[in-house]
């Protein structure tokens, strides 16, 4: 019990004793008791009015009182003093945070659940032509007019980034939820990166085109020399030249194909592809390529996906070809597809040499090889999985890789089913 409350109780008890004694002497106990309660109530109402006035405009000067009200004023003042210090500290932290975010080169915009702008930094103002405070409180999709942008904002898929063009610049957007139904939208200018990628693709495409003719000429002359010579000393070098020439031709073909896939000029993706039929064709081609060196098993389920049949066949064939190259003879290779609530899955599984975990994340890079010497011996160009990656990206699919040395590998393509694609189209 606090000292103030203790004194208040003692005062009430003492006043009650005085009222009882005087009341017995005068015979007016009830009247004195009522009068005492009235005085006590008026006293508290008086102090309550003073407290309300002080709370309306708090100052360092406290109202003067006695008893429990004096202690209440004292506690309120210290609470007010602590809150002022905490408010100043919080204000300093917020100011530092805003200063640091204003200096960020990446545009940042805070949105509420209704997509209304609550705050934005200097980079966002420059990138999206926003003005403070005019645009604060406005819906961002009303200020940034773009179907791609509006669709992305309405979906609000956490940490799912997209690229879109705005004011002749390419931007990467990412939205992150925080707090209570609030979202942080970040945007980064990737115009220069896109230009560099375009230059790289143009260079690869032009170089492949220019090299194709001389390589073809060399291959033709080598083939002619092989037909005309009978010397074994000359035939052996010519065979090596032919092998390397064919390998160069394959690399040029893969580079041209990869440049085409990266160009963004995608063919129509609205073809319904029956996977059982597609996998049967891939399996038949694999049997011809394999020449009975492995056990090739095919397992299919009725399923359809939306996409480009030629590109899908090429991607799955690349996975099967890799399995044939890197699985020892008499090994088992499974080509399959499955269907579940997450979509349609197409995979190639083998019991071959496997891959170390540290290599898996880089397998889809151009010319990346786990074992460069072995890959060249097997005839690989190092571009197969890069082609698979880009085909899947164009089909909004993902490549899942699972492998351990000595336990074989699993390469699985995860697609949305035909019905899921139809539902998304109808919803749009």
Image (cartoon, rainbow, N blue to C red):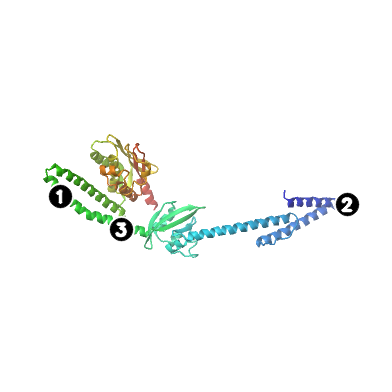
Q: Residue at (27%, 42%) from the top-left corner?
A: 282
Q: Residues within 10 Å of mark 1 (few under 14, many from 20)?
A: few
Which percent across, then down, holds residue 132?
Answer: 49, 64
What's the CA distance linking mark 2 and mark 1? 140 Å
Q: Residues within 10 Å of mark 2 (few under 14, many from 20)?
A: few
Q: Which residue is mark 1?
A: 221
Give the foreground label among 2 and 1.
1
Which percent across, then down, holds residue 123?
Answer: 44, 61
Marker disc for residue 25: 2
Of the image marks 2 and 1, the number of the one nearer the N terminus? 2
Under circle 2, the secondary element is helix
Marker disc for residue 199: 3
Give the foreground label among 1 and 3.
1
Front residue of this view, candidates 316 and 328: 328
- 52 over 218 or under it: above or below: below
Of the image marks 1 and 3, the number of the one nearer the N terminus? 3
Is residue 109 visible in the rendered image? The answer is yes
Front residue of this view, candidates 25 and 190: 190
Give the foreground label among 3 and 2.
3
Marker disc for residue 102: none
Under circle 3, the secondary element is helix
């Amino acid at each position: 019990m606090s000292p103030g409350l203790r004194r208040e109780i003692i005062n009430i008890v003492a006043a009650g004793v005085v009222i009882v004694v005087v009341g017995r002497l005068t015979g007016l106990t009830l009247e004195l008791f009522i009068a005492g309660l009235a005085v006590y109530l008026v006293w508290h109402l008086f102090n309550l009015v003073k407290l309300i006035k002080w709370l309306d405009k708090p100052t360092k000067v406290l109202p003067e009182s006695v008893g429990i009200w004096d202690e209440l004023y004292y506690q309120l003042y210290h609470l007010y003093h602590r809150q002022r210090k905490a408010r100043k500290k919080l204000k300093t932290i917020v100011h530092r945070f805003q200063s640091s975010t204003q200096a960020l080169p990446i545009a940042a915009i805070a949105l509420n659940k209704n997509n209304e702008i609550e705050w934005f930094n200097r980079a966002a103002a420059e990138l999206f032509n926003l003005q403070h405070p005019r645009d604060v409180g406005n819906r961002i999709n009303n200020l940034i007019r773009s179907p791609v942008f509006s669709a992305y904002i309405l979906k609000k898929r956490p940490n799912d980034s997209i690229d879109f063009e705005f004011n002749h610049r390419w931007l990467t957007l990412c939205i992150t939820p925080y707090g209570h139904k609030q979202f942080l939208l970040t945007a980064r200018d990737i115009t220069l990166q896109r230009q560099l990628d375009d230059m790289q693709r143009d260079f690869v495409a032009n170089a492949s085109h220019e090299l194709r003719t001389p390589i073809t000429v060399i291959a033709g002359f080598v083939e002619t020399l092989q037909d005309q010579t009978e010397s074994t000393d000359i035939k052996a070098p010519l065979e090596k030249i032919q092998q390397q020439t064919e390998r160069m031709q394959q690399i040029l073909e893969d580079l041209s194909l990869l440049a085409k896939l990266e160009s963004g000029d995608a063919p129509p993706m609205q073809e319904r592809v029956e996977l059982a039929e597609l996998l049967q064709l891939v399996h038949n081609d694999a049997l011809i390529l394999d020449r009975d060196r492995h056990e090739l098993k095919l397992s299919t389920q009725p399923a359809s996906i939306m996409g480009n049949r030629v590109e899908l066949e090429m991607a799955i064939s690349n996975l099967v070809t890799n399995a044939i190259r890197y699985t020892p003879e008499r090994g088992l290779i499974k080509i399959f597809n499955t269907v579940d609530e997450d979509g349609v899955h197409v995979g190639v599984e083998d019991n071959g040499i496997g891959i170390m975990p540290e290599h898996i994340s880089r397998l889809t890079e151009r010319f990346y090889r786990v074992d460069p010497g072995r890959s060249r011996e097997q005839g690989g160009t190092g571009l197969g999985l890069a082609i698979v990656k880009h085909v899947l990206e164009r089909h909004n699919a993902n490549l899942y890789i699972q492998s351990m040395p000595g336990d074989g590998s699993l390469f699985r393509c995860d697609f949305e089913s035909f019905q899921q694609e139809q539902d998304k189209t109808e919803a749009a």
